[in-house]
Image (cartoon, grey):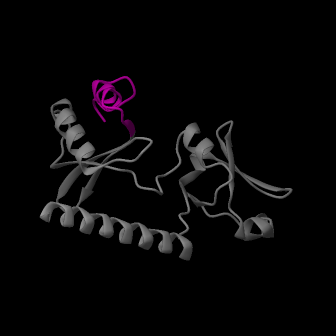
Amino acid sequence: IIGLYEGSKSWAKAEQQGFELVDVELVREGASRYLRIYIDKPDGITLSNCETYHRAVAPLVERVDYDFLEVCSPGLDRPLKKQKDFDKHAGEMVEIHLFRPIIASDIPAILKHTRKVYILEDGEIVIRAGENEMRFKQKEVSLCKPVIVVTEEDIALDDEDEEAAGEQSEEGEASDEQ
């Protein structure tokens, strides 16, 4: 897409603001065309970050034919595309979608249930479980993303965080009244 490539003004604008330009897509939804720009940073993206980058990039993409410009976070399960994405998630469970199906008998039994990405090596996604290994050329993979597993412990920790935030809020209100 015009103006949204490495080294472009849009790319530089993202870097100046401390963001990584993760992905760009131009998609048709119904009668409308959406230009979606995904940005990220190590500690996550806020709505304010999206708004700031939206204002900065809008004039730079005027020549693109779109109806709506969206700037958003790629999410926790952002697709793995670049070497650094694979490095960050090495050893984690991933979900892989291929452009073409493979014959089930070609998959070692242990790999049918254990999909841990090992590495992106020479343009291939390598999955290993023990001694078993499968390799997929990156161009054969339509999607590779981390599997997000939420445990009961995660939910309990989140509940504790919410309770603590509520208590702090109540303490703040009490001190305001005094």
Q: Quadrant of residue 167?
A: bottom left
Point out the residue furthest to the right here: 131
Residue at the location (35% across, 32% down)? 18
Residue at the location (20% across, 61% down)? 175
Q: Image quadrant for the N terminus? A: top left
Residue 17 lies in magenta, yes or no? yes
Residue 155 lies in magenta, yes or no? no
Question: In the depicted view, which residue is nearer to us: 157 or 143?
Answer: 157
Percent of width and height locating residue 159:
42, 73
Q: Image quadrant for the C terminus? A: bottom left
Percent of width and height locating residue 42:
45, 42
Residue 128 left/right relative to 40:
right
Percent of width and height locating residue 146:
55, 57
Q: Quadrant of residue 176?
A: bottom left
Question: In the depicted view, which residue is nearer to us: 63 or 154?
Answer: 154
What segment carries the magenta color?
Answer: 1-21
Residue 111 vertical placement versus 6 (above, below): below
Percent of width and height locating residue 152:
54, 76
Q: Is residue 32 visible?
A: yes
Residue at the location (33% across, 65% down)? 165
